[in-house]
Image (spheres, rainbow, N blue to C red):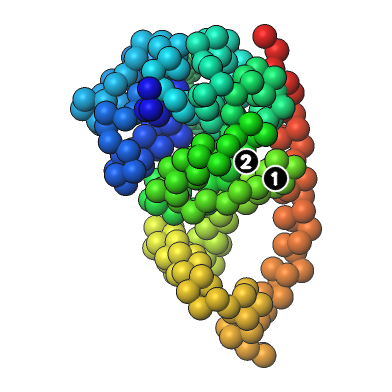
Amino acid sequence: MDCLGVIGYGQMGSMLVNGFLASGVLRVDEVVVSSKSQKSRDACAAAWPGISIVATNAELARRCRMVIIAVRPQEIAGILDEIVPVMDGGKHIVSLATGVGLEGLEAAFTGPVTRVVPTVTSRVGQGTTLICHGRQVGMDDALRVERLFSSISDVVLVEESNLPVATFLSSCGPGLLAAIIEELAGAASRAGGLSTDQALLLATRMVAATAAYLRETGETPPDLIRRVATSGGITKVGVQELQRRLPGTFDEVFAAMLEQHDALRVDGYRP
Ligand SMILES: NC(=O)c1ccc[n+]([C@@H]2O[C@H](COP(=O)([O-])OP(=O)(O)OC[C@H]3O[C@@H](n4cnc5c(N)ncnc54)[C@H](OP(=O)(O)O)[C@@H]3O)[C@@H](O)[C@H]2O)c1
C-alpha cells in the first residue's frame, strides 16, 4: 500500500524510476510501474530486475499510495478514468502533464493532487523540478513528493499561475540552451578554423563552466560581463552585439512558447 506507482515508462517516467532507485531514496520493492507498450514494460524489467510491472493502471492505483502520471497531456483523461474509481482520498495523484491544471485534476479526484514539472537534466542529477501542490495536499504528502524529487534535482515550489514561465526556464530551457550551443558552435566553425565537432566540444564545455562559475562565485551575469568584456576588447564587441539583438529575440521566443502552451492546455477534466 505504501509504494510509489509510475504510470508511463517513457522519457520522464523512466528517468524518474531510474533516478529514484539509483539515488537509493526508494527500493525496487517500493516501486510499481505500468506502461502501455510491451516494449516499455520490457525495458523497465531489464533495467530493474525484480521491479513490479502491472498489467493495468487500475491495479497500480489499487496497490500504491502515491501515483505519478507520466503520460502526454492528451492521455491523462483516459488514465484518470481508469484509476480514480479505485482510489480513496488517502491516496495522492502526482501529474507531470504540462497544461493540465490543478482545477481539472481536482475535479476528477477529490483527494490530494500535485503538479510536478521535471527536467531532462535530472538524468545527470542536475536542474530544478518545479512543484505545485493542490489544496488537499497535507504536510506529509507534500514532504514526501519534495523528498522524492530532491533525490534527483533541486526542487522549487511554484504558484500555479507562475508554472508556465517557470517551466519555460527550467524544463524547456535545456532544449533552448542546446539550440544556442549548436548555433554558437556553427558560427565558430563557419568563421573558420575549427571543425563542427571541435567547436561543439568547446562551446559545451564553456557553457557548463560558465554556469558553474556563476553558481560557485555568486557573481551575477553583469559582474561576469564586466570581468571579461574589457573596454576596447573583443568580448565587449560581441556582448554589445548580443545585447542589441537578444532582448527582442527572447521576447519573441517566450511569446511563441506561451501561445503554444495555451493551445495545448487541457482545460478541465471531461469524463
Ligand atoms: N520530456 C520532457 O522534458 C518533459 C518535461 C516536463 C514535463 N513533461 C511532461 O511529462 C509527461 C510525459 O512526457 P514524456 O516526454 O515522458 O512522454 P513520452 O516519452 O511520450 O512518454 C509517455 C508515456 O506514456 C505512456 N502511456 C501512454 N498511454 C498510456 C496508458 N494508457 N497507460 C500507461 N502508459 C501510457 C507511454 O507508454 P509506452 O511507452 O508503453 O507506449 C509512454 O511511455 C508529459 O505530460 C509532458 O508534458 C515532459
Could you tell me the amino acid type at mark 2?
Cys
| Residue at 63 percent of width and 31 percent of height | 136
Crowding at mark 2 (Cα within 10 Å: few <14, some 14-19, many 20+): many
Image quarter hosting the C terminus: top right
Question: Which of the 4 image quarters holds residue 63?
Answer: top left
Against 209, residue 236 (above or below) is below
Q: Is residue 9 above or below residue 119?
A: above
Marks 1/2: CA distance? 6 Å
Earlier sequence position, callout 1 versus callout 2: 2
Q: Helix, strand, or loop for circle 2?
A: strand
On the image, the x and y values in percent for residue 86 come to 50, 11
Picture quadrant where residue 231 is located: bottom right
Q: Position of residue 5 (x, y in %)?
A: 41, 25
Instruction: Tell me what residue is drawn at x 45 percent, y 61 percent.
Output: 204
* Quadrant for the N terminus in the image: top left
Task: Name the residue beneath numbered marker 2.
Answer: 132
Residue lying furthest bottom: 231
Q: Quadrant of residue 19?
A: top left
Q: Is residue 195 visible?
A: no
The answer to whether residue 30 is seen in the rendering is yes
Query: Is residue 181 shown left or right of residue 235?
Result: left
Measured from the top left, where is residue 159 in percent x and y? 70, 45
Residue 159 got which mark?
A: 1
Q: Is residue 87 left or right of residue 235?
A: left
Q: What residue is at 48 percent from the left and 74 percent from the top? A: 216
Asked if marks 1 and 2 touch (Cβ < 8 Å), the reply is yes
Residue 17 as seen in the image, left or right of residue 57:
left
Q: Residues within 10 Å of mark 1 (few under 14, many from 20)?
A: few
Q: Nearer the viewer, residue 132 or 177?
A: 132
Amino acid type, mark 1 = Glu
**Label 1 beta carbon within 8 A of ligand 1:** no
- x then y, percent, for residue 124: 38, 51
